[in-house]
Amino acid sequence: MLDPLVAAFVDHPELSLFLALAIGYALGKISFGSFTVGSVTGCLIAGVLIGQTGVVVSKDVQQAFFLLFLFAIGYRTGPQFFRSLNAAALPQIAVTVVLCVTALAVVLAVAPVLGLELGIAAGLLAGAATESATVGVAIDAFHKTGPTAEAASAFEAQIATGFAVAYLVGVITTILMHSQIAPRFFGRSLKEACAEMEEELGAGGDGRQLPFTARREVEARTFRIDERWVGTTVKEAEARVPPRSKAYVEQLRRGGEILEVTPDTRFESGDIVCIAGLRGLLVEHAGEIGTEVDDVELLDLPVDRVDVVITSSEVAGKRLAELREFPEARAVFLRRVLRAGQQIPSYPRLVLQKGDVLTIAGSRQHVAEAAARLGYADRPTTATDMVYVALFIVAGGLFGIPALKLGALELGLGVAVGVLIGGLVAGWLRSVKRTFGFVPEATLWLFDSVGLCAFIACVGISAGPSFVQGLVESGPALVVVSIVVVVLAHGAALVVGRKLFKMNEGVLAGTCCGAGTSAPALAAVQEIAESRVPTLGYGLGYAIGNVLLAVWGSVLVIVLGS
Protein backbone atom coordinates (compact mmCIF):
# COMPACT_ATOMS: atom_id res chain seq x y z
CA MET A 1 0.00 0.00 0.00
CA LEU A 2 2.93 2.30 0.69
CA ASP A 3 4.75 1.41 -2.52
CA PRO A 4 3.19 4.22 -4.61
CA LEU A 5 4.06 6.77 -1.91
CA VAL A 6 7.63 5.52 -1.66
CA ALA A 7 7.94 5.61 -5.43
CA ALA A 8 6.72 9.21 -5.44
CA PHE A 9 9.43 10.24 -2.97
CA VAL A 10 12.10 8.37 -4.92
CA ASP A 11 11.03 10.12 -8.13
CA HIS A 12 10.76 13.50 -6.37
CA PRO A 13 13.55 13.62 -3.75
CA GLU A 14 12.87 17.32 -3.14
CA LEU A 15 9.61 16.27 -1.46
CA SER A 16 11.41 13.72 0.69
CA LEU A 17 13.71 16.49 1.95
CA PHE A 18 10.78 18.59 3.13
CA LEU A 19 9.20 15.51 4.70
CA ALA A 20 12.43 14.99 6.63
CA LEU A 21 12.28 18.60 7.83
CA ALA A 22 8.67 18.21 8.94
CA ILE A 23 9.38 15.02 10.87
CA GLY A 24 12.71 16.30 12.17
CA TYR A 25 11.39 19.57 13.61
CA ALA A 26 8.52 17.63 15.20
CA LEU A 27 10.93 15.15 16.79
CA GLY A 28 13.11 18.04 17.93
CA LYS A 29 10.35 19.29 20.23
CA ILE A 30 10.34 16.09 22.29
CA SER A 31 11.66 16.73 25.80
CA PHE A 32 12.92 14.50 28.61
CA GLY A 33 12.94 16.65 31.71
CA SER A 34 15.12 19.65 30.91
CA PHE A 35 16.69 17.92 27.88
CA THR A 36 15.21 18.53 24.43
CA VAL A 37 16.06 16.35 21.43
CA GLY A 38 16.58 19.39 19.19
CA SER A 39 15.86 19.96 15.53
CA VAL A 40 19.34 18.93 14.34
CA THR A 41 19.13 15.48 15.90
CA GLY A 42 15.49 15.19 14.86
CA CYS A 43 16.26 15.93 11.22
CA LEU A 44 19.19 13.52 11.18
CA ILE A 45 16.96 10.72 12.50
CA ALA A 46 14.20 11.62 10.04
CA GLY A 47 16.70 11.65 7.18
CA VAL A 48 18.03 8.22 8.13
CA LEU A 49 14.51 6.78 8.26
CA ILE A 50 13.61 8.22 4.85
CA GLY A 51 16.95 7.07 3.47
CA GLN A 52 15.88 3.46 4.01
CA THR A 53 13.57 3.86 1.00
CA GLY A 54 16.47 4.45 -1.37
CA VAL A 55 15.81 8.17 -1.95
CA VAL A 56 18.80 10.03 -3.36
CA VAL A 57 19.11 13.80 -2.85
CA SER A 58 21.51 15.78 -5.04
CA LYS A 59 24.83 16.65 -3.38
CA ASP A 60 24.52 20.14 -4.84
CA VAL A 61 21.29 20.72 -2.92
CA GLN A 62 22.97 19.45 0.24
CA GLN A 63 25.95 21.77 -0.25
CA ALA A 64 23.80 24.81 -1.07
CA PHE A 65 21.92 24.52 2.23
CA PHE A 66 25.20 24.06 4.10
CA LEU A 67 26.70 27.22 2.59
CA LEU A 68 23.67 29.23 3.69
CA PHE A 69 24.17 27.90 7.22
CA LEU A 70 27.88 28.76 7.22
CA PHE A 71 27.21 32.28 5.97
CA ALA A 72 24.61 32.78 8.69
CA ILE A 73 26.87 31.80 11.59
CA GLY A 74 29.68 33.90 10.11
CA TYR A 75 27.43 36.92 9.62
CA ARG A 76 26.03 36.62 13.13
CA THR A 77 29.38 36.26 14.89
CA GLY A 78 31.60 38.38 12.62
CA PRO A 79 31.46 41.60 14.67
CA GLN A 80 32.23 39.79 17.91
CA PHE A 81 34.98 37.69 16.30
CA PHE A 82 37.04 40.56 14.88
CA ARG A 83 36.52 42.92 17.81
CA SER A 84 37.55 40.24 20.29
CA LEU A 85 41.09 40.08 18.93
CA ASN A 86 42.61 42.27 21.64
CA ALA A 87 44.49 41.88 24.90
CA ALA A 88 41.43 42.49 27.08
CA ALA A 89 39.75 39.40 25.66
CA LEU A 90 42.81 37.17 26.13
CA PRO A 91 41.36 35.01 28.95
CA GLN A 92 38.22 34.12 26.99
CA ILE A 93 40.20 33.59 23.78
CA ALA A 94 42.65 31.30 25.60
CA VAL A 95 39.86 29.26 27.20
CA THR A 96 38.14 28.82 23.84
CA VAL A 97 41.33 27.82 22.04
CA VAL A 98 42.27 25.34 24.78
CA LEU A 99 38.84 23.70 24.63
CA CYS A 100 38.80 23.42 20.84
CA VAL A 101 42.42 22.24 20.53
CA THR A 102 41.96 19.66 23.30
CA ALA A 103 38.84 18.25 21.64
CA LEU A 104 40.71 17.84 18.35
CA ALA A 105 43.78 16.35 20.05
CA VAL A 106 41.77 13.78 21.98
CA VAL A 107 39.96 12.57 18.85
CA LEU A 108 43.21 12.43 16.87
CA ALA A 109 44.76 10.39 19.69
CA VAL A 110 41.97 7.90 20.33
CA ALA A 111 40.84 7.28 16.74
CA PRO A 112 43.92 5.20 15.69
CA VAL A 113 44.03 3.41 19.04
CA LEU A 114 40.39 2.30 18.79
CA GLY A 115 40.58 1.74 15.06
CA LEU A 116 37.82 4.24 14.30
CA GLU A 117 37.00 4.81 10.65
CA LEU A 118 37.80 8.31 9.36
CA GLY A 119 34.14 9.26 9.02
CA ILE A 120 33.32 7.96 12.51
CA ALA A 121 36.18 10.05 13.95
CA ALA A 122 34.95 13.18 12.15
CA GLY A 123 31.40 12.60 13.37
CA LEU A 124 32.74 12.01 16.88
CA LEU A 125 34.52 15.36 16.90
CA ALA A 126 31.52 17.22 15.48
CA GLY A 127 29.09 15.60 17.90
CA ALA A 128 31.16 15.78 21.07
CA ALA A 129 31.90 19.45 20.35
CA THR A 130 28.23 19.93 19.33
CA GLU A 131 29.42 21.80 16.21
CA SER A 132 27.39 20.76 13.17
CA ALA A 133 29.57 22.79 10.80
CA THR A 134 32.40 20.31 11.38
CA VAL A 135 30.35 17.67 9.57
CA GLY A 136 30.03 19.66 6.36
CA VAL A 137 33.63 20.87 6.35
CA ALA A 138 34.88 17.31 6.90
CA ILE A 139 32.75 16.03 4.01
CA ASP A 140 34.02 18.87 1.80
CA ALA A 141 37.63 18.03 2.73
CA PHE A 142 37.12 14.30 2.13
CA HIS A 143 35.79 14.95 -1.36
CA LYS A 144 39.08 16.70 -2.18
CA THR A 145 40.94 13.43 -1.67
CA GLY A 146 39.39 12.12 -4.89
CA PRO A 147 37.39 9.24 -3.40
CA THR A 148 35.26 6.85 -5.40
CA ALA A 149 31.50 7.23 -5.21
CA GLU A 150 31.35 4.21 -2.91
CA ALA A 151 34.03 5.62 -0.59
CA ALA A 152 32.29 9.01 -0.44
CA SER A 153 28.98 7.36 0.37
CA ALA A 154 30.59 5.22 3.08
CA PHE A 155 32.29 8.28 4.60
CA GLU A 156 29.00 10.17 4.83
CA ALA A 157 27.30 7.18 6.44
CA GLN A 158 30.11 6.94 8.98
CA ILE A 159 30.09 10.64 9.82
CA ALA A 160 26.30 10.59 10.25
CA THR A 161 26.60 7.62 12.62
CA GLY A 162 29.37 9.21 14.66
CA PHE A 163 27.57 12.55 14.82
CA ALA A 164 24.21 11.08 15.81
CA VAL A 165 25.62 9.28 18.83
CA ALA A 166 28.22 11.84 19.89
CA TYR A 167 25.91 14.86 19.54
CA LEU A 168 23.34 13.57 22.00
CA VAL A 169 26.06 12.48 24.42
CA GLY A 170 27.92 15.75 23.89
CA VAL A 171 24.92 17.94 24.70
CA ILE A 172 24.01 15.98 27.85
CA THR A 173 27.60 15.73 29.12
CA THR A 174 28.29 19.43 28.49
CA ILE A 175 25.18 20.37 30.46
CA LEU A 176 26.15 18.13 33.37
CA MET A 177 29.77 19.27 33.21
CA HIS A 178 29.00 22.94 33.72
CA SER A 179 25.81 22.85 35.75
CA GLN A 180 26.70 20.04 38.19
CA ILE A 181 30.31 18.82 38.08
CA ALA A 182 32.34 22.04 37.69
CA PRO A 183 30.70 23.88 40.63
CA ARG A 184 31.64 20.98 42.93
CA PHE A 185 35.19 21.08 41.62
CA PHE A 186 35.47 24.81 42.28
CA GLY A 187 33.88 24.56 45.69
CA ARG A 188 30.97 26.94 45.30
CA SER A 189 27.73 27.08 43.35
CA LEU A 190 27.17 28.93 40.11
CA LYS A 191 24.57 31.01 41.92
CA GLU A 192 27.20 32.26 44.37
CA ALA A 193 29.72 32.95 41.60
CA CYS A 194 27.21 34.86 39.50
CA ALA A 195 26.04 36.85 42.53
CA GLU A 196 29.65 37.91 43.09
CA MET A 197 29.98 39.03 39.47
CA GLU A 198 26.67 40.89 39.70
CA GLU A 199 28.04 42.76 42.71
CA GLU A 200 31.19 43.68 40.76
CA LEU A 201 29.02 44.94 37.90
CA GLY A 202 27.04 47.12 40.27
CA ALA A 203 23.82 45.15 40.49
CA GLY A 204 23.67 45.39 44.27
CA GLY A 205 22.78 42.69 46.73
CA ASP A 206 19.22 42.37 45.48
CA GLY A 207 20.42 41.32 42.03
CA ARG A 208 18.52 44.08 40.30
CA GLN A 209 19.73 45.39 37.01
CA LEU A 210 20.78 48.87 35.97
CA PRO A 211 18.67 51.50 37.75
CA PHE A 212 17.22 52.91 34.56
CA THR A 213 16.46 49.50 33.04
CA ALA A 214 12.67 49.38 32.69
CA ARG A 215 11.88 46.01 34.18
CA ARG A 216 8.20 47.02 34.26
CA GLU A 217 6.13 48.73 31.64
CA VAL A 218 6.87 52.40 30.97
CA GLU A 219 3.97 54.80 30.68
CA ALA A 220 3.18 58.53 30.60
CA ARG A 221 0.68 60.22 32.93
CA THR A 222 -0.41 63.85 33.40
CA PHE A 223 -0.61 65.72 36.70
CA ARG A 224 -1.60 69.21 37.82
CA ILE A 225 1.46 69.90 39.97
CA ASP A 226 1.26 70.46 43.68
CA GLU A 227 2.10 74.00 44.83
CA ARG A 228 5.26 72.70 46.53
CA TRP A 229 6.84 72.33 43.10
CA VAL A 230 6.26 75.95 42.00
CA GLY A 231 9.61 77.61 41.26
CA THR A 232 11.42 74.28 41.03
CA THR A 233 13.31 73.51 37.81
CA VAL A 234 12.74 70.33 35.82
CA LYS A 235 16.30 69.25 36.59
CA GLU A 236 15.77 69.69 40.33
CA ALA A 237 12.49 67.78 40.24
CA GLU A 238 13.95 64.87 38.29
CA ALA A 239 16.89 64.70 40.71
CA ARG A 240 14.43 63.68 43.45
CA VAL A 241 13.45 60.48 41.64
CA PRO A 242 14.54 57.46 43.73
CA PRO A 243 17.92 56.05 42.59
CA ARG A 244 16.47 52.68 41.58
CA SER A 245 13.84 54.22 39.30
CA LYS A 246 13.52 56.70 36.49
CA ALA A 247 11.03 59.37 35.43
CA TYR A 248 11.27 62.60 33.48
CA VAL A 249 9.09 65.51 32.43
CA GLU A 250 8.24 65.21 28.75
CA GLN A 251 6.26 68.43 28.24
CA LEU A 252 3.77 70.66 30.07
CA ARG A 253 0.61 72.68 29.56
CA ARG A 254 0.66 76.28 30.74
CA GLY A 255 -2.66 77.98 30.29
CA GLY A 256 -3.96 76.74 26.97
CA GLU A 257 -0.53 76.17 25.43
CA ILE A 258 1.61 73.01 25.34
CA LEU A 259 5.29 73.80 25.91
CA GLU A 260 8.45 71.79 25.37
CA VAL A 261 10.65 71.67 28.47
CA THR A 262 14.38 71.87 29.13
CA PRO A 263 16.21 70.96 32.34
CA ASP A 264 16.12 74.67 33.31
CA THR A 265 12.36 75.13 32.83
CA ARG A 266 10.71 76.30 36.11
CA PHE A 267 7.25 75.13 37.14
CA GLU A 268 4.53 77.70 37.66
CA SER A 269 1.26 77.46 39.56
CA GLY A 270 -1.41 75.60 37.58
CA ASP A 271 1.02 73.83 35.25
CA ILE A 272 -0.05 70.39 34.01
CA VAL A 273 2.94 68.14 33.36
CA CYS A 274 3.31 65.01 31.30
CA ILE A 275 5.65 62.63 33.14
CA ALA A 276 7.02 59.43 31.61
CA GLY A 277 8.40 56.77 33.91
CA LEU A 278 8.05 53.34 35.43
CA ARG A 279 4.42 52.63 36.08
CA GLY A 280 5.04 51.47 39.64
CA LEU A 281 6.92 54.66 40.46
CA LEU A 282 4.17 56.91 39.11
CA VAL A 283 1.49 54.98 40.97
CA GLU A 284 3.38 55.01 44.27
CA HIS A 285 4.29 58.71 44.16
CA ALA A 286 1.28 60.19 42.37
CA GLY A 287 0.13 62.05 45.47
CA GLU A 288 3.51 63.74 45.89
CA ILE A 289 3.47 65.00 42.29
CA GLY A 290 0.01 66.52 42.35
CA THR A 291 -3.49 65.74 41.16
CA GLU A 292 -3.72 63.38 38.21
CA VAL A 293 -5.77 64.64 35.27
CA ASP A 294 -6.64 63.11 31.93
CA ASP A 295 -5.12 65.53 29.42
CA VAL A 296 -5.50 63.63 26.15
CA GLU A 297 -3.74 66.24 24.03
CA LEU A 298 -0.76 66.46 26.40
CA LEU A 299 -0.46 62.66 26.33
CA ASP A 300 -0.63 62.51 22.54
CA LEU A 301 3.08 61.78 22.05
CA PRO A 302 4.58 59.65 19.27
CA VAL A 303 6.63 56.94 21.02
CA ASP A 304 9.25 54.58 19.68
CA ARG A 305 11.19 51.48 20.65
CA VAL A 306 14.35 50.91 18.62
CA ASP A 307 17.34 48.58 18.55
CA VAL A 308 20.46 50.75 18.37
CA VAL A 309 23.77 49.21 17.31
CA ILE A 310 26.75 50.80 19.02
CA THR A 311 29.15 52.09 16.38
CA SER A 312 30.34 55.25 18.14
CA SER A 313 33.94 55.17 19.39
CA GLU A 314 32.85 57.63 22.07
CA VAL A 315 30.43 55.06 23.52
CA ALA A 316 32.34 51.79 23.00
CA GLY A 317 34.54 51.04 25.99
CA LYS A 318 32.36 52.99 28.42
CA ARG A 319 30.48 51.41 31.28
CA LEU A 320 26.72 51.36 30.97
CA ALA A 321 26.30 53.65 33.98
CA GLU A 322 28.47 56.28 32.32
CA LEU A 323 25.84 56.72 29.62
CA ARG A 324 23.60 58.32 32.24
CA GLU A 325 25.85 61.37 32.04
CA PHE A 326 24.91 61.85 28.39
CA PRO A 327 22.12 64.45 28.08
CA GLU A 328 20.39 62.17 25.54
CA ALA A 329 19.98 59.49 28.23
CA ARG A 330 17.65 61.66 30.31
CA ALA A 331 14.52 60.94 28.30
CA VAL A 332 14.95 57.34 27.12
CA PHE A 333 14.60 53.98 28.83
CA LEU A 334 16.97 51.07 28.31
CA ARG A 335 15.05 47.83 27.83
CA ARG A 336 17.79 45.28 27.06
CA VAL A 337 21.36 44.76 25.82
CA LEU A 338 22.24 42.14 23.19
CA ARG A 339 25.70 40.84 22.38
CA ALA A 340 26.20 38.32 19.56
CA GLY A 341 22.45 37.72 19.54
CA GLN A 342 22.29 36.89 23.27
CA GLN A 343 20.69 39.13 25.88
CA ILE A 344 23.27 40.03 28.50
CA PRO A 345 22.68 41.58 31.94
CA SER A 346 22.51 45.38 31.80
CA TYR A 347 24.41 46.11 34.99
CA PRO A 348 25.91 49.56 35.68
CA ARG A 349 29.56 48.57 35.30
CA LEU A 350 29.04 46.48 32.16
CA VAL A 351 31.59 47.64 29.55
CA LEU A 352 29.97 48.23 26.17
CA GLN A 353 31.52 47.09 22.90
CA LYS A 354 31.03 48.08 19.30
CA GLY A 355 28.37 45.84 17.82
CA ASP A 356 26.37 45.61 21.05
CA VAL A 357 22.67 46.30 20.52
CA LEU A 358 20.81 48.51 23.00
CA THR A 359 17.02 48.48 22.87
CA ILE A 360 15.78 51.90 23.96
CA ALA A 361 12.28 53.33 24.33
CA GLY A 362 10.84 56.80 24.69
CA SER A 363 9.31 59.58 22.66
CA ARG A 364 10.27 59.44 19.00
CA GLN A 365 12.32 62.62 19.12
CA HIS A 366 14.33 61.60 22.17
CA VAL A 367 14.92 58.09 20.84
CA ALA A 368 16.24 59.53 17.57
CA GLU A 369 18.61 61.85 19.45
CA ALA A 370 19.93 59.01 21.63
CA ALA A 371 20.33 56.69 18.65
CA ALA A 372 22.38 59.29 16.79
CA ARG A 373 24.73 59.57 19.78
CA LEU A 374 25.09 55.81 20.26
CA GLY A 375 25.39 54.61 16.69
CA TYR A 376 22.88 53.29 14.20
CA ALA A 377 19.13 52.74 14.66
CA ASP A 378 18.43 49.25 13.38
CA ARG A 379 14.77 49.68 12.54
CA PRO A 380 12.71 46.58 11.73
CA THR A 381 12.43 45.63 8.09
CA THR A 382 11.72 42.44 6.20
CA ALA A 383 13.97 43.24 3.23
CA THR A 384 17.12 41.13 2.90
CA ASP A 385 20.08 42.48 0.93
CA MET A 386 20.43 39.30 -1.13
CA VAL A 387 22.97 40.93 -3.44
CA TYR A 388 25.23 41.33 -0.42
CA VAL A 389 24.56 37.80 0.86
CA ALA A 390 25.11 36.08 -2.49
CA LEU A 391 28.25 38.05 -3.37
CA PHE A 392 29.92 37.24 -0.05
CA ILE A 393 29.04 33.55 -0.38
CA VAL A 394 30.58 33.53 -3.87
CA ALA A 395 33.62 35.59 -2.80
CA GLY A 396 34.20 33.44 0.27
CA GLY A 397 33.85 30.23 -1.73
CA LEU A 398 36.31 31.44 -4.38
CA PHE A 399 38.72 32.49 -1.65
CA GLY A 400 38.66 28.98 -0.22
CA ILE A 401 39.14 27.09 -3.51
CA PRO A 402 42.91 27.52 -4.10
CA ALA A 403 44.76 24.55 -2.64
CA LEU A 404 48.16 22.94 -2.57
CA LYS A 405 48.06 19.52 -4.25
CA LEU A 406 50.05 16.69 -2.73
CA GLY A 407 49.30 13.66 -4.87
CA ALA A 408 45.59 13.00 -4.60
CA LEU A 409 45.32 15.23 -1.52
CA GLU A 410 44.47 18.93 -1.72
CA LEU A 411 45.52 21.14 1.20
CA GLY A 412 43.47 24.33 1.39
CA LEU A 413 40.65 26.07 3.18
CA GLY A 414 37.95 24.68 0.92
CA VAL A 415 34.71 26.27 -0.22
CA ALA A 416 32.96 25.65 3.10
CA VAL A 417 35.56 27.37 5.29
CA GLY A 418 35.88 30.11 2.68
CA VAL A 419 32.15 30.84 2.91
CA LEU A 420 32.39 30.89 6.71
CA ILE A 421 35.15 33.50 6.44
CA GLY A 422 33.06 35.40 3.89
CA GLY A 423 30.20 35.46 6.39
CA LEU A 424 32.50 36.71 9.16
CA VAL A 425 33.71 39.57 6.98
CA ALA A 426 30.18 40.38 5.80
CA GLY A 427 28.88 40.54 9.37
CA TRP A 428 31.78 42.70 10.50
CA LEU A 429 31.41 45.13 7.59
CA ARG A 430 27.69 45.39 8.30
CA SER A 431 28.44 46.34 11.92
CA VAL A 432 30.87 49.03 10.79
CA LYS A 433 28.65 50.54 8.07
CA ARG A 434 24.98 49.92 8.78
CA THR A 435 23.64 51.39 5.55
CA PHE A 436 24.01 48.17 3.50
CA GLY A 437 24.11 44.41 3.86
CA PHE A 438 21.08 44.07 6.11
CA VAL A 439 19.86 40.54 6.85
CA PRO A 440 16.78 40.42 9.16
CA GLU A 441 16.82 38.09 12.13
CA ALA A 442 14.06 35.99 10.55
CA THR A 443 16.20 35.45 7.45
CA LEU A 444 19.23 34.58 9.55
CA TRP A 445 17.11 32.01 11.37
CA LEU A 446 16.04 30.54 8.03
CA PHE A 447 19.64 30.32 6.81
CA ASP A 448 20.92 29.07 10.15
CA SER A 449 18.26 26.62 11.33
CA VAL A 450 16.71 25.44 8.07
CA GLY A 451 20.03 25.55 6.22
CA LEU A 452 21.66 23.35 8.85
CA CYS A 453 18.71 21.00 9.33
CA ALA A 454 18.22 20.52 5.57
CA PHE A 455 21.93 19.73 5.21
CA ILE A 456 21.85 17.28 8.14
CA ALA A 457 18.68 15.68 6.74
CA CYS A 458 20.45 15.19 3.38
CA VAL A 459 23.39 13.57 5.16
CA GLY A 460 20.96 11.29 7.00
CA ILE A 461 19.16 10.34 3.78
CA SER A 462 22.49 9.46 2.13
CA ALA A 463 23.58 7.47 5.17
CA GLY A 464 20.25 5.70 5.60
CA PRO A 465 21.02 2.28 4.12
CA SER A 466 24.18 1.65 6.21
CA PHE A 467 23.43 3.81 9.24
CA VAL A 468 21.87 1.12 11.43
CA GLN A 469 24.73 -1.30 10.89
CA GLY A 470 27.29 1.38 11.72
CA LEU A 471 25.35 2.38 14.83
CA VAL A 472 25.27 -1.21 16.11
CA GLU A 473 28.98 -1.69 15.48
CA SER A 474 30.27 1.63 16.83
CA GLY A 475 27.54 2.96 19.12
CA PRO A 476 28.71 1.70 22.56
CA ALA A 477 32.32 2.74 21.99
CA LEU A 478 31.24 6.15 20.69
CA VAL A 479 29.24 6.86 23.83
CA VAL A 480 32.27 6.30 26.05
CA VAL A 481 34.69 8.19 23.81
CA SER A 482 32.27 11.12 23.44
CA ILE A 483 32.12 11.50 27.21
CA VAL A 484 35.93 11.40 27.37
CA VAL A 485 36.25 14.11 24.69
CA VAL A 486 33.78 16.43 26.44
CA VAL A 487 35.24 15.92 29.92
CA LEU A 488 38.85 16.42 28.83
CA ALA A 489 38.17 19.38 26.51
CA HIS A 490 35.86 21.27 28.85
CA GLY A 491 37.87 20.22 31.91
CA ALA A 492 41.08 21.63 30.43
CA ALA A 493 39.30 24.88 29.56
CA LEU A 494 37.87 25.18 33.08
CA VAL A 495 41.26 24.63 34.69
CA VAL A 496 42.97 27.21 32.46
CA GLY A 497 40.20 29.74 32.93
CA ARG A 498 39.95 29.42 36.70
CA LYS A 499 43.49 28.58 37.80
CA LEU A 500 45.49 30.61 35.28
CA PHE A 501 43.22 33.56 34.52
CA LYS A 502 41.12 33.59 37.73
CA MET A 503 37.93 34.01 35.71
CA ASN A 504 34.60 34.17 37.50
CA GLU A 505 33.02 30.71 37.32
CA GLY A 506 29.78 32.05 35.85
CA VAL A 507 31.51 33.89 33.01
CA LEU A 508 33.85 30.91 32.53
CA ALA A 509 30.92 28.50 32.20
CA GLY A 510 29.35 30.77 29.58
CA THR A 511 32.64 30.98 27.68
CA CYS A 512 32.96 27.19 27.62
CA CYS A 513 29.34 26.78 26.48
CA GLY A 514 30.07 29.26 23.68
CA ALA A 515 33.34 27.58 22.72
CA GLY A 516 31.42 24.30 22.50
CA THR A 517 28.65 26.11 20.56
CA SER A 518 26.13 24.66 23.00
CA ALA A 519 23.11 26.90 23.50
CA PRO A 520 21.30 24.17 25.51
CA ALA A 521 24.20 24.10 27.98
CA LEU A 522 24.09 27.90 28.31
CA ALA A 523 20.36 27.74 29.06
CA ALA A 524 20.95 25.07 31.70
CA VAL A 525 23.76 27.06 33.32
CA GLN A 526 21.61 30.20 33.47
CA GLU A 527 18.76 28.22 34.99
CA ILE A 528 21.00 26.79 37.72
CA ALA A 529 22.70 30.13 38.36
CA GLU A 530 19.42 32.09 38.26
CA SER A 531 21.41 34.76 36.44
CA ARG A 532 22.32 36.03 32.97
CA VAL A 533 25.97 36.49 33.94
CA PRO A 534 27.11 33.43 31.89
CA THR A 535 25.99 35.20 28.70
CA LEU A 536 28.83 37.69 29.24
CA GLY A 537 31.26 34.96 28.18
CA TYR A 538 29.12 33.10 25.66
CA GLY A 539 29.31 35.46 22.67
CA LEU A 540 33.09 35.56 22.33
CA GLY A 541 33.49 31.83 22.91
CA TYR A 542 30.78 31.11 20.34
CA ALA A 543 32.34 33.38 17.71
CA ILE A 544 35.82 31.85 17.94
CA GLY A 545 34.65 28.30 18.66
CA ASN A 546 32.50 28.21 15.52
CA VAL A 547 35.49 29.07 13.36
CA LEU A 548 38.00 26.72 14.98
CA LEU A 549 35.70 23.71 15.24
CA ALA A 550 34.58 24.12 11.63
CA VAL A 551 38.21 24.23 10.45
CA TRP A 552 38.97 21.15 12.58
CA GLY A 553 36.78 19.10 10.23
CA SER A 554 39.29 19.70 7.46
CA VAL A 555 42.31 19.28 9.74
CA LEU A 556 41.08 15.92 11.03
CA VAL A 557 40.51 14.55 7.53
CA ILE A 558 43.98 15.71 6.41
CA VAL A 559 45.79 14.30 9.46
CA LEU A 560 43.98 10.97 9.83
CA GLY A 561 43.34 10.54 6.11
CA SER A 562 47.02 10.84 5.29
Image (cartoon, rainbow, N blue to C red):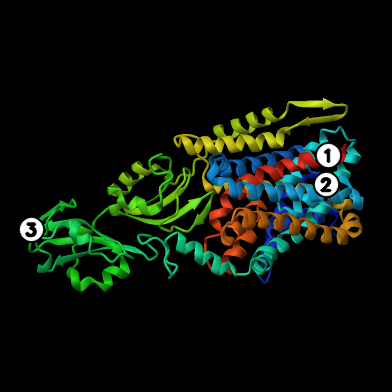
- Residue 418 vs 244, above or below: the answer is above
Q: Position of residue 8 (x, y in %)?
A: 80, 49
Q: Amino acid at mark 2?
A: Leu
- Residue 270 as seen in the image, left or right of residue 391: left
Residue 89 shows which numbered tag?
A: none
Helix, strand or loop at label 1? It is: helix
Is tag 1's residue or tag 2's residue first in the polypeptide sequence? 2
Q: Which residue is mark 3?
A: 255
Q: Are marks 1 and 2 in contact (CB under 8 Å)?
A: yes
Q: Amino acid at mark 1?
A: Val
Is tag 2's residue or tag 3's residue first in the polypeptide sequence? 2
- Residue at 43% over, 40% down: 311
- Residue 80 as seen in the image, left or right of residue 44: left
Near mark 3 (Cα within 10 A), the count class, few <14, some 14-19 or many ≥20, is few
- Residue at 82% over, 36% down: 143
Residue 108 shows which numbered tag?
A: 2
Helix, strand or loop at label 3? It is: loop
Q: Are marks 3 and 1 in contact (CB under 8 Å)?
A: no
Helix, strand or loop at label 2? It is: helix
Which quadrant holds the N terminus? Answer: bottom right
Residue 44, quarter of picture: bottom right
Nearest to the observer: residue 243 or residue 9: 243
Q: Which residue is mark 1?
A: 559
Nearest to the observer: residue 361 or residue 458: 361
Is tag 3's residue or tag 1's residue first in the polypeptide sequence? 3
Marks 3 and 1, Cα distance to the nearest angstrom? 83 Å
Marks 2 and 3, Cα distance to the nearest angstrom? 81 Å
**Residue 461 seen:** no
- Residue 4 vs 554, above or below: the answer is below
